[in-house]
Image (spheres, rainbow, N blue to C red):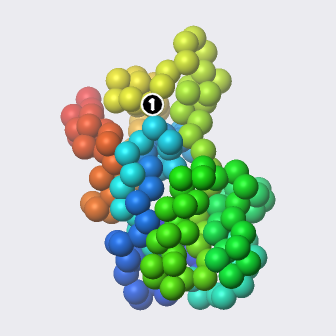
Amino acid sequence: MIPNPRELLINKETPWNDDGPSLPIEYARISRGNRLTLVLYDKAEPISTLWSIMLTNKLDVAKENLRIREGMNSTRQIGFVDLVRDQHSDFSDTKDIAAVTEWARSKSIDAVIWTGLKSNFESKLYEIYGGQRRPVNIENINWFLNKLSSKEFNNVKDYILSTPKSTITGLRMSIESVINNFD
């Protein structure tokens, strides 16, 4: 999303801010086209996130816009914190809600939204390839990368290498090493 915001209602001239809330993020989701993507992942160490102001002050419009950008079927998986109405998404981890709420207050921001898709790495690998369930770690990511077609691998590579350099997850450097040394 960062390098290619497409129709996201943000000021495309203004760079993303790099002082977002610290949240546990990792390459722990297999998305369309077998892309390995970043998601909130409760087993990851928190890292600083990027953020941008949206060009709407209506929470429902912002959530719908993010849903469209992410190609999601509904806004039920758009996480949110609304400090004005004292509401938040009910599926999000309480630690993540607390971190986002505290951060939003410190920035005097009324509401925050994010893509709330969860890790599906273990279940997706099991669904596609069968056998044992494989947790998110570099060995299993390497195993997954070796199963991809050339086109799928290049899509994963493009996604990972286009992730902002400031987004350093626990597995990023290892994944980049595997990708760059791939035969």
- Most distant residue in the top direction: 131
Location of residue 29 in the rendering, given as x and y in whole percent from the top left corner: 53, 41
* Residue at x 41%, y 70% (from the top left corner): 20
- Residue 62 visible from this viewpoint: no
* Residue at x 55%, y 27% (from the top left corner): 122
Q: Which residue, given by chain and number where applicable, does mark 1 sit on?
A: 136
- Say few, some or many: other residues with alpha carbon within 10 Å of mark 1 (under 14 / 14 to 19 / 20 or more): many
Side of 153 where 95 appears, left or right: right
Question: Observer-nearest residue: 52 or 83?
Answer: 83
Q: Quadrant of residue 180?
A: top left
Q: Quadrant of residue 26?
A: top left
Location of residue 50 in the rendering, given as x and y in whole percent from the top left corner: 41, 68
Location of residue 142 in the rendering, given as x and y in whole percent from the top left corner: 36, 27
The quadrant in which the C terminus is found is top left
Question: Observer-nearest residue: 6 or 125?
Answer: 125
SS state under label 1: loop
Q: How many marks?
A: 1
Side of 176 where 136 appears, left or right: right
- Three-letter amino acid code at the position of disc 1: Val
In the rendered view, would you say 39 is above or below 65? above
Question: Observer-nearest residue: 39 or 43?
Answer: 43
* Residue at x 70%, y 73% (from the top left corner): 86
- Residue 40 visible from this viewpoint: yes
* Residue at x 60%, y 21% (from the top left corner): 126
Location of residue 108 in the rendering, given as x and y in whole percent from the top left corner: 51, 85
In the rendered view, would you say 69 is above or below 94? below
